[in-house]
Image: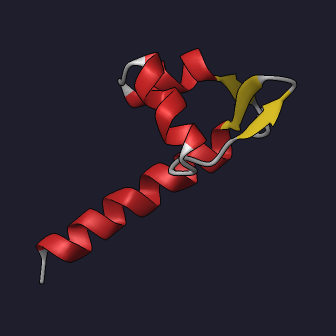
Amino acid sequence: MTDEILTIREVAELLKINEKTAYKLASAGKIPGFKVGGSWRFQRQEIASWIKRKVEEQQGSNGE
């Protein structure tokens, strides 16, 4: 399913980071997410696109 919704724990596992770090990034607007009630949720496709953009940004800045 391409519209799969992930929890903060699942996003942390996907990004191989601590849950607290994922929460801080989400709260700061650095990773794309939204709140449902008091809980963060993330669309898997949005996270995949964010990862791709970050990789491209780093490759671009390293090549200059």
The residue nearer to you, when weighing 6 against 34, is 34
User: Which residue: 13% across, 71% down?
Assistant: 62
Q: Residue at x 68, y 42 (%)?
A: 33
Q: As drawn, is 37 to the left or to the right of 57? A: right
Dividing the image into 4 quarters, which one contains the N terminus? top right
Image coordinates for residue 3, horizontal then vertical, percent: 79, 39
Vertical order, 45 against 19 (above or below):
below
Q: Residue furthest bottom?
A: 64
How has the structure been colored for display? secondary structure
In the rendered image of this protein, does residue 59 appear above or below residue 21? below
Horizontally, residue 24 falls left or right of residue 37, namely left
Q: Quadrant of the C terminus?
A: bottom left
Q: Nearer the viewer, residue 1 or 56?
A: 56
Q: Position of residue 58 (x, y in %)?
A: 25, 64
Q: Position of residue 49 (x, y in %)?
A: 55, 55
Q: Residue at x 47, y 18 (%)?
A: 19
Pinpoint residue 27: horizontal percent, then vertical percent.
58, 40
Residue located at (53% from left, 28% from top): 23
Q: Hey, which quadrant is residue 20 in on the image?
A: top left
How many marks the image carries: the answer is 0
Q: Is residue 4 left or right of residue 32?
A: right
